[in-house]
């Protein structure tokens, strides 16, 4: 859903980069904000007297998205895009989500089963997104039903804000993640459906590294 606003978001973050930032710098900043978001969740939920840190989590998540957008924009703008860069970008997307949200495993009274399901579905959603590039149509799928990468950042950021005002809300985190997981699961289904829709009627040949 939020991905439909990517054009407007790109205009804002491109202004932030000015003429001084490079694609690699955006990537490094993105890694830093991933770690800060994870640290903010852990500290804010684990130590009630430091709960104010939770208010920084939404900011860190938004900045992580901004840097992720910028590294791709700048690499295309300066003609420095490479296959290795795309591999790194996709790996950082899924790895970043795993770090940002996986830290909840270590929070006292944190979720376990619901978080595991949530992370598995995140990996599935991103897998189907990338799979679209290898099938007829050759496009990275970003369709979402409230479970795409920007949506997930919003849901977790919203949880952090609620938990700041009511620390006991952490006890409802398993149910909260279960609800978000449904949206991520629907996003997986939507991307699969779109891949098959685009591929319908198109010629398709399957190859492996050893041939057919």
Image (spheres, rainbow, N blue to C red):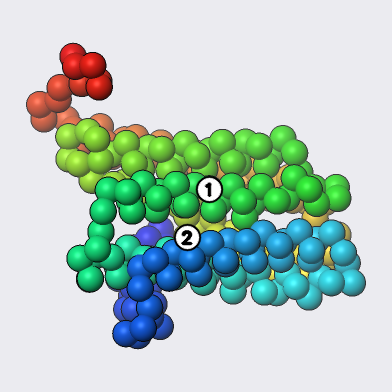
Mark 1 vs 2, N-terminal side? 1
Point out the image quarter for the N terminus.
bottom left
Q: Is residue 93 left or right of residue 170?
A: left
Give the residue at mark 1: 95
Residue drawn 66% across the image and 37% down it: 116
178 or 41: nearer the viewer: 41
Quadrant hosting residue 41:
bottom right
Q: Residues within 10 Å of mark 1 (few under 14, many from 20)?
A: some
Provide residue 86's location: percent of width, then percent of height. 33, 51
Quadrant hosting residue 129:
top left
* Secondary element at tag 2: helix
Give the residue at mark 2: 150
Q: Is residue 23 left or right of residue 196?
A: right
Quadrant hosting residue 156:
bottom right
Residue drawn 47% across the image and 36% down it: 124
The reply to whether residue 197 is visible in this rendering is no
Q: In the picture shown, does residue 159 fall above or below 18?
A: above
Q: Is residue 182 left or right of residue 89?
A: right
Residue drawn 64% across the image and 66% down it: 36
Q: In the picture shown, does residue 122 fall above or below 76?
A: above
Residue drawn 66% across the image and 47% down it: 102
Q: In the picture shown, does residue 112 fall above or below 212?
A: below
Q: In the picture shown, does residue 2 fall above or below 107?
A: below
Q: Nearer the viewer, mark 1 or mark 2?
A: 1
Q: Is residue 38 left or right of residue 2?
A: right
- The Cα–Cα distance between marks 1 and 2, rounded to whole angstroms, is 15 Å
Point out the image quarter for the C terminus.
top left
- Residue furthest top as drawn: 212
Q: Residues within 10 Å of mark 2 (few under 14, many from 20)?
A: some
Provide residue 118's location: percent of width, then percent of height. 60, 41
* Secondary element at tag 1: helix
The reply to whether residue 13 is visible in this rendering is yes
């Amino acid at each position: 859903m939020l991905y439909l606003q990517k054009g407007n978001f790109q205009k804002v973050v491109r202004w932030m980069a000015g003429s001084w930032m490079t694609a690699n710098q955006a990537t490094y900043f993105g890694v830093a904000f991933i770690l800060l978001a994870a640290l903010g969740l852990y500290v804010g939920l684990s130590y009630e007297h430091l709960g104010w840190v939770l208010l920084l989590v939404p900011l860190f998540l938004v900045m992580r998205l901004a840097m992720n957008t910028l590294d791709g924009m700048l690499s295309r703008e300066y003609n420095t895009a490479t296959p290795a860069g795309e591999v790194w970008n996709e790996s950082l997307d899924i790895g970043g989500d795993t770090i940002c949200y996986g830290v909840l495993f270590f929070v006292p009274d944190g979720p376990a089963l619901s978080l595991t399901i949530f992370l598995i579905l995140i990996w599935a959603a991103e897998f189907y997104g990338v799979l679209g590039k290898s099938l007829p149509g050759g496009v990275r799928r970003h369709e979402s039903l409230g479970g795409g990468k920007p949506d997930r950042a919003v849901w977790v950021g919203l949880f952090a804000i609620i938990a700041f005002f009511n620390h006991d809300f952490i006890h409802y985190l398993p149910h909260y993640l279960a609800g978000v997981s449904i949206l991520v699961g629907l996003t997986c289904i939507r991307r699969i459906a779109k891949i098959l829709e685009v591929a319908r009627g198109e010629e398709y040949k399957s190859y492996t590294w050893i041939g057919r």
